[in-house]
Image (cartoon, rainbow, N blue to C red):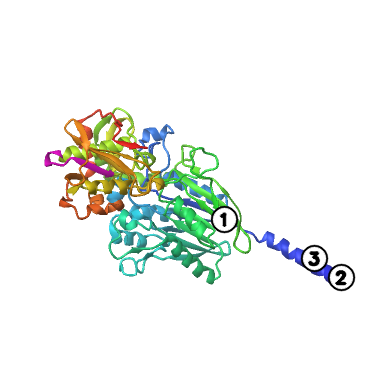
Amino acid sequence: MIIRLLASAAALALTTGTAFADYTLTVLHTNDFHARFEPISKYDSGCSEEDNQEGKCFGGSARLMTAIEAAKARTNNYILVDGGDQFQGTLFYTYYKGKLAAEMMNKMGYDAMTVGNHEFDDGPEVLRGFVDTVNFPVLMSNADYSGEPLLSDAIQKSVIIERGGERLGLIGLTPVDTDELSSPGPNVIFTDPVDAVQAEVDKLTAEGVNKIIVLSHSGYLVDQRVAAETTGVDVIVGGHDNTYLSNVSDRAKGPYPTMVGDTAIVQAYAYGKFLGELNVTFNDDGVITEAVGEPIIMDAAVTEDEATKARITEAAQPLEEIRNEVVAEAADAIDGERSSCRQVECEMGNLIADAMLDRVRDQGITIAIQNGGGIRASIDAGPVTMGEVLTVLPFQNTLSTFYVTGQTIVDALENGVSQYEEVKGRFPQVAGLKFTFDVSQPVGSRISDVMVADGMGWKPIDLAAEYGVVSNNFVRNGGDGYKMFVNANHVYDFGPDLADVTAEYLGERSPYTPFLDGRITAK
């Protein structure tokens, strides 16, 4: 009897000890920063210093630095990670490529990031330069890059780091369609995210790691699939589709974190507007027993770190002449929001498509198609600077003209609405064209009532006839799934820069009044 009591007491002591051994970790995270080193407006575009001083701006590296340091001070155990797409989006990237991003991330003390699709915008060479400059691992599990000499010895699929006496496994994940979204070249082959993550989880688990975090630039829906179809993943830090998760905002797409089984999924919108802060507790088996937090908004309540602000101001000097040139006036704000331009006819889409078509109409071109994912910001009312236009259209795409049949155009529109539910960038903004789509129908049969301009009126598209089309060189070369344009006739991919064309069009119609005219109809 005494022995049994002693054994029970020992078991109770062991259980109590286990409770005290729970491991807590704060996961600080960002995603889709897109070179927004300076503060942004409520439209996610540039924000003047005057407005910044008046408290009207958000984000910027200087605020992010302050918020990160404050968050680190609130915990004795943290990691700082990024969900990809540091590259592309403002003149800072156009001028510095990845160098300024690397400098700022090193200064802020990041522990790891995953490769976003935009990290490939200037090919493997620029990505390699970034990887060589940062003081932390850059991860990508779902790709075979062994045949790309610039990346084969630079990027890792996963990594183990130590925090607070525990080993953490970090895995990177990149969009499986990056070859359509960017320019990784022929030597990088992307693979299924679930299989890739599970393979790395199994590898890490075999090495005794039972706390695993996936840095996923794949979107909220894919993250939920990965969580549901893999075992052993504890946290997924997301990116790619600019999802805002929150427990306090009615604008959020889901709770922060979103739990799928025992896996906590988080994402913090984009452009440095929020710093994600997730506090997780693991038991001895590496299972999450608590996951709580909320993205912290980088508004005027967050003071700007003076040293960081001074460095960004210094880095901006070479850009000032280009950026501050006023090219037009906007009578009202021009909506270029992601949620608009990737799902419905949007004001910025009409402006860009009209500008494209206007530039080449005298060449016999009658239709313009612009991918909604190429539209990166809105423009507020008042003076429009070249810097604002370049923030909307940062990719240095050129106008492409080509000829295809009416059937090919319908196929292109079907592609454009094929991933509507996922808010993908392939959604088409058009000019010289009208169409209706119905997402209740199966993919491939969602488009109807396609009409082409005919003088002052409209007529049904002729599937057998050939039409002259203008788009950007990214789309014409098969980007965003528009592979039906790759073998077009009479192709010319080297027209003027799309941003320049749009700026000139705005200037010729200043003050420009944004509009919708029903060229795209949803059933």
What is the x, y in percent for residue 391? 31, 42
Which numbered tag is attached to residue 97? none
For this rendering, which residue is in front, 399 or 406? Answer: 406
Residues drawn in magenta: 361-370
Which residue in the structure is indicated by mark 2? 2
Mark whose residue sits in front, 1 or 2: 1
Mark whose residue sits in front, 3 or 1: 1
Residue name at image x 83 percent, y 70 percent? 4
- Which of pointers 3 and 1 lies earlier in the amino acid sequence? 3
Describe the element under mark 3 as helix, strand or loop: helix
Q: Residues within 10 Å of mark 2 (few under 14, many from 20)?
A: few
Residue name at image x 37 percent, y 36 percent? 49
Q: Amino acid at mark 2?
A: Ile
What is the x, y in percent for residue 104? 39, 52
Q: Quadrant of the C terminus?
A: top left
For this view, does 46 lie left or right of residue 214? left
Residue name at image x 58 percent, y 64 percent? 165
Q: Is residue 190 visible?
A: yes
Q: Residues within 10 Å of mark 3 (few under 14, many from 20)?
A: few
Q: Quadrant of the N terminus?
A: bottom right
Which residue in the structure is indicated by mark 3? 9
Q: Residues within 10 Å of mark 1 (few under 14, many from 20)?
A: few
Q: Is residue 107 magenta?
A: no
Q: Amino acid at mark 1?
A: Gly
Q: Is residue 367 magenta?
A: yes
Residue name at image x 82 percent, y 69 percent? 6
- Which of pointers 3 and 2 lies earlier in the amino acid sequence? 2
Describe the element under mark 1 as helix, strand or loop: loop
Q: Amino acid at mark 3?
A: Ala
| Res 15 quadrant in image | bottom right
